[in-house]
Amino acid sequence: MQTGMHTDTERCLRAVRSKDARFDGWFFTAVLTTGIYCRPSCPVVSPKPANMTFHPSAAACQQAGFRACKRCRPDTSPGSPEWNRRADLTARAMRLIADGVVDREGVPGLAARLGYSTRQIERQLLAELGAGPLALARAQRAQTARLLVETTPLPMADIAFAAGFASIRTFNDTVREVYALSPSELRTRAPRNRQTRTAPGALSLRLPFRTPLNPDNLFGHLAATAVPGVEEWRDGAYRRTLRLPYGHGIVALTPNPDHIGCRLTLSDLRDLTVAISRCRRLLDLDADPAAVDDQLRADPLLAPLVDKAPGRRVPRTVDEAEFAVRAVLGQQVSTAAARTHAARLVTAHGDPVDDPEGGLTHLFPSTQALAAVDPENLAMPRTRRTTFTTLVSHLADGSVNLGVECDWAETRTRLLDLPGFGPWTADVIAMRALGDPDAFLPTDLGIRRAAGELGLPATPAALTARAAAWRPWRAYAVQYLWATDSHPINFLPV
């Protein structure tokens, strides 16, 4: 079992005294004299050390009877980077809870996906996070409810069910308990500029992150590889369609200095929590750039790259299966050719959607739809057809699982067992779809070219040995190495 930062009292006290926003989401400060809990960067005068206790999650604070601070709004902190860095049971469970599994399938569904008993899951989460899966999901529902109350004109009854509450009474009681205000009082207190009038099912919100964040390669990669009909870059925003548990959505994500602007249009508001979680995951917003950059900067050959543009994130995905299919389509072809192959599949087999702004036309095809495609209709070499059809059939029948709960090492091994899957394909899926922060691409042409320019070892084996010093952040080292090239993926679109 991992020991969280909240157990290191002296380190927590230093973070609180210095109002260090880098630690927001790592732990929460509960103040015994006021009964509230705060983020480490809360601007109020720091309480006496004797009056502070530290907790690993907002849910743990709520379980202990503390309510959220109205000044620093700790429930809106970036998520803990631990759940992106780790692949153990707790991290996998937290990724599933963020994806709304407890709300849709209950704790038994969470346990079944992880392959453990409900008792084991409860015990592990309680030991490390101070709260079980129900309490963690409840804290997430409360945060979603607050977001909807403050930023939309929706009726409270609609908000209650959209946030995942089973009844209006439970919604009212939870909001009062967590925020010490009724839902209507929350709405009254919300700044007017935060209440956005939008079409039904649409809303605008801000996605926080830990600074620094370099948007160039992040949005550059997404825009340069965008599949027509599914993704586009328009008016300074990356837009794409989303396949969600209860329906579909369209999101526009805009980089800003202190947040990512997020405009969501959903066919069913119950998908809000999942959509936010997937957008955060897409943009790697819960990363800890200070920890990443400090370690990579220790290598004298990487240090100038990090110092030039710190805070690079790993561009990820909103749909793991979609990315795996696109990785196969992109084997040994240019970015433009891969987009063309994907666009043909989208037009022929994707589900059409109505985009009020125009430009987006389809959801990326489901694995079930792709599994039914006649291989002879695929405009690609026969060996890649075999790779494609084998992958989609395994994804469709569940024999290969790329969900947020999967074990990274085990899944990589399963992928390598498939025909046509070499280390590059398995590792790029591990890096961008599974979210493994230590995935590395020593055979990638761009990486080998960058290595030659920087004086790093030339052969994949030697480069892998040198990269051991970059662990567990080799996926971020890949972003810095790629950035030495003039490829469009490295530049924010104009």
Image (cartoon, helix red, strand yellow):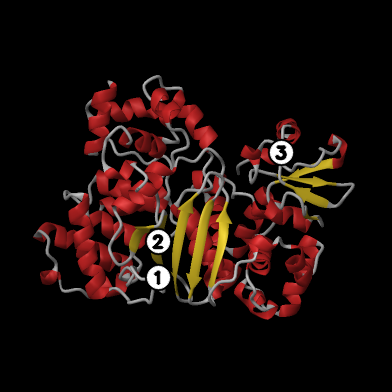
Name the amino acid type tagged 2.
Arg
Q: Earlier in the sequence, mark 2 or mark 1?
A: 2
Q: Label 2 vs label 1: CA separation? A: 10 Å
From the viewer's perspective, is the residue at label 2 or at label 3 nearer? 2
Q: Are marks 2 and 1 in contact (CB under 8 Å)?
A: yes
The crowd level at tag 3 (other Cα within 10 Å; few <14, some 14-19, many 20+) is some
x 36%, y 76%: residue: 353
**For the residue labelled by badge 2, is the local secondary structure a helix, a strand or a loop?**
strand
From the viewer's perspective, is the residue at label 2 or at label 1 nearer? 1
Indicate left or right for 358 with 90 as reference: left
Where is mark 3, residue-wise?
7
Q: Is residue 116 visible?
A: no
x 74%, y 43%: residue: 42
Q: Nearer the viewer, residue 71 or 52?
A: 71
Q: Residue 239 shows which numbered tag? A: 2
Indicate left or right for 407 with 228 as reference: right
The crowd level at tag 1 (other Cα within 10 Å; few <14, some 14-19, many 20+) is few
The picture places residue 220, in percent across and down from the top left corner, at: 35, 47
Name the amino acid type tagged 1.
Glu
